[in-house]
Amino acid sequence: MAPFNLSVDDLISELEQDLPDADPVARVGEARSRARALGDLGDQLIDHFIRAARENGASWSQIGDAMGVSKQAAQQRGTGRFARFTDRAREVVAAAQALARERRNPSVEPEHVLVALLDARAALAAKLISVLGDPDALAETAAARLPGPSETVPEHVPFSAGAKQLLEETTQSALDLGHNYVGTEHLLLGILRMPDSGAGRVLTDAGFSYDYTKQTTQAALAGLQHRNKR
């Protein structure tokens, strides 16, 4: 395998040239931001070559073997991270990204997603939250947990490791319920599957639990299906 053209020394030199007067602590923050951006670029690189392999006739099993994952995992990755998201769920994720850019945050965190989720008052998740708690109080608490602005923000604000985990937990929540789509209610459950995250603590401190919220979600969806059949 040929070595990468870009080395750690190159990255260090570039950061120091871009921030010649920054103190060491500020450089730590910038390094963290750039590392996250590099991770996001890596994901895009993999996605590009998955698409190219598919266009060249490769099967999902072959791609899964090359990635060291199952056929199903490769197919889910290759069809797009948000392929099964409903329009409202996509809108929440887009709003979280916009919020991160607006606040000049270097990455999208689970807390951005929670604030956006609470703001989508017409979505099922917000309606569930209004039954289980106080949306206004939760929104205020969640907003207070958002990170402060950074001196430099990448043009493409990447998802943090925590936000990527949230997307995985969200998808798993949908699978656990036997759903072939991902809605705002699954985003809510995904956050509750991460009780140690800042967003998870906002909900758990307010008395939310994964099991009870899951039961409430199932009851709400069953009620909607019953009304639609009438």
Image: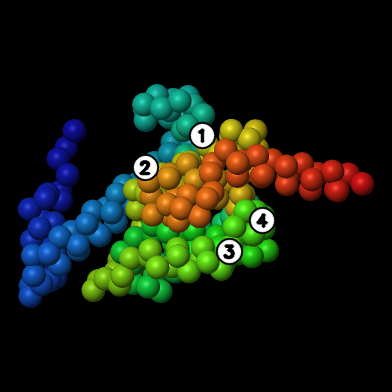
Question: What is the spatial separation of the Cα atoms under label 3 and label 2, in whole angstroms?
Answer: 39 Å
**For marks 3 and 2 on the same chain, the one whose residue lies earlier in the sequence:** 2
The three-letter amino acid code for the residue at tag 1 is: Gln
* Crowd rating for badge 3 (residues with CA inside 10 Å; few <14, some 14–19, many 20+): some
The residue pinned by badge 2 equals 46
Residue 167, can we see it?
no
Residue at image coords 45%, 65%: 141
The residue pinned by badge 1 equals 75
**For marks 4 and 1 on the same chain, the one whose residue lies earlier in the sequence:** 1
The residue pinned by badge 4 equals 131
Q: Which corner quadrant holds the N terminus?
A: top left
As helix, strand or loop, the secondary structure at mark 4 comes to helix
* 3 and 1 marks in contact (CB < 8 Å): no
**For marks 4 and 2 on the same chain, the one whose residue lies earlier in the sequence:** 2
Give whichever of 123, 107 is nearer the camera: 123
x and y, in percent, of residue 20 in the image: 7, 72
Q: Is residue 179 above or below residue 182?
A: above
Mark 4 or 2, closer to the camera: 4
The three-letter amino acid code for the residue at tag 2 is: Ile
The residue pinned by badge 3 equals 135
Question: What is the spatial separation of the Cα atoms under label 4 and label 2, in whole angstroms?
Answer: 41 Å
Give whichever of 229, 63 is nearer the camera: 229
The three-letter amino acid code for the residue at tag 3 is: Pro
Q: Quadrant of residue 28?
A: bottom left
Q: Is residue 131 left or right of residue 102?
A: right
Residue found farthest to the right: 230
Residue at image coords 62%, 53%: 132
x and y, in percent, of residue 41 in the image: 32, 52
As helix, strand or loop, the secondary structure at mark 1 comes to helix
Question: What is the spatial separation of the Cα atoms under label 3 and label 1, in whole angstroms?
Answer: 36 Å
Mark 3 or 2, closer to the camera: 3
